[in-house]
Image (spheres, rainbow, N blue to C red):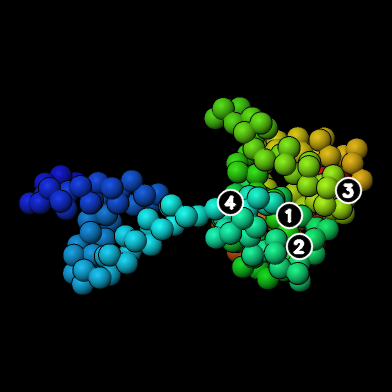
Amino acid sequence: MLNHYSSKLVEEAVGELSKLPGIGKRTAMRLALHLLKQDAAYSERLGNSIIQMRENILFCKKCHNISDHEICEICNNPKRDVQLICVVEDIRDVIAIENTGQFLGLYHVLGGLISPMDGISPSNLTIEQLKNRIETENIKEIILALSATVEGDTTNFYIYRQLKEKAVKISTIARGVAIGDEIEFADEITLGRSIVARLPYETGL
């Protein structure tokens, strides 16, 4: 383990970097030493970009995706199918599906999945906002694109029960995504085909 540092400044930097997901102490040390080798302007740009992101990032008022503006570029794109909404767990799933190039509708980011063990209930997610969108935006179809996990299936079923009486088609992505897999880790071809070959949700009940 790397426990001894000749500089308190390096030690503090390594400590903060190691708090990032997937970054251990050794990787954090390599990153800190890499930054030390760069010119000061590089570190300043990196630091400023992180500060600007943290202070100025917004969440789209319609779909809750990250955005530089009140309404994100996807929701504002006139070429998107505004009657089709893909429901996802978080922003990483939007990026994963966009990378497939197979989906041209809009999104709705829940902000998590129902998980009583983790203290996450429907009220902690943007499900009510989804219901409001269906009532006000003339939505024709909802695609449930949640991870094939217990939490994902629980959330799918809850949303289905909330929406089944409304005049909207409810689909789910085809199980090209293996049981237990998370959306963001599915390869682009498999994920794209799962979106295109989506199925009516009730057929999977």
Q: Secondary structure at mark 3?
A: loop
Precedes in sequence: disc 4 or disc 2: 4
Residue at 21% x, 68% y is: 40
Badge 3 or badge 2: first in the primary sequence: 2
Which of label 4 and label 3 is nearer to you?
4
**From mark 2 to mark 1, how far is it between C-alphas?**
7 Å
Q: CA distance from mark 4 to mark 1?
A: 17 Å
Amino acid carrying mark 3 in the image: Val
Element under disc 4: strand
Compared to residue 35, the image places residue 128 above or below, namely above
- Sequence order check: which comes first, mark 1 or mark 3? 1
* Amino acid on which disc 2 is placed: Gly
**Residue linked to disc 3:** 168
Instruction: Please tell me which of labels 4 and 3 falls first in the chain.
Output: 4
* Distance of label 3 from label 2 (alpha carbons): 15 Å
**Residue 124 drawn above or below residue 148:** above
Contact, CB < 8 Å: mark 4 with mark 2?
A: no
> Which is more N-terminal, label 1 or label 4?
4
Mark 2 vs 1, N-terminal side: 1
Gap in angstroms between the C-alphas marked 1 and 3 = 13 Å
Q: Residue 81 at x, y = what percent?
A: 80, 64
**What is the number of the mark on residue 59?**
4
Task: Look at the numbered disc 2 and give the secondary structure of its residue.
Answer: strand
Q: Closer to the observer: label 4 or label 2?
A: 4
Residue 13: image x %, image y %?
23, 51
| Residue that numbered label 2 is attached to | 105
Residue 65: quadrant of the picture = bottom right
- On screen, residue 116 versus residue 132, left or right, reads left
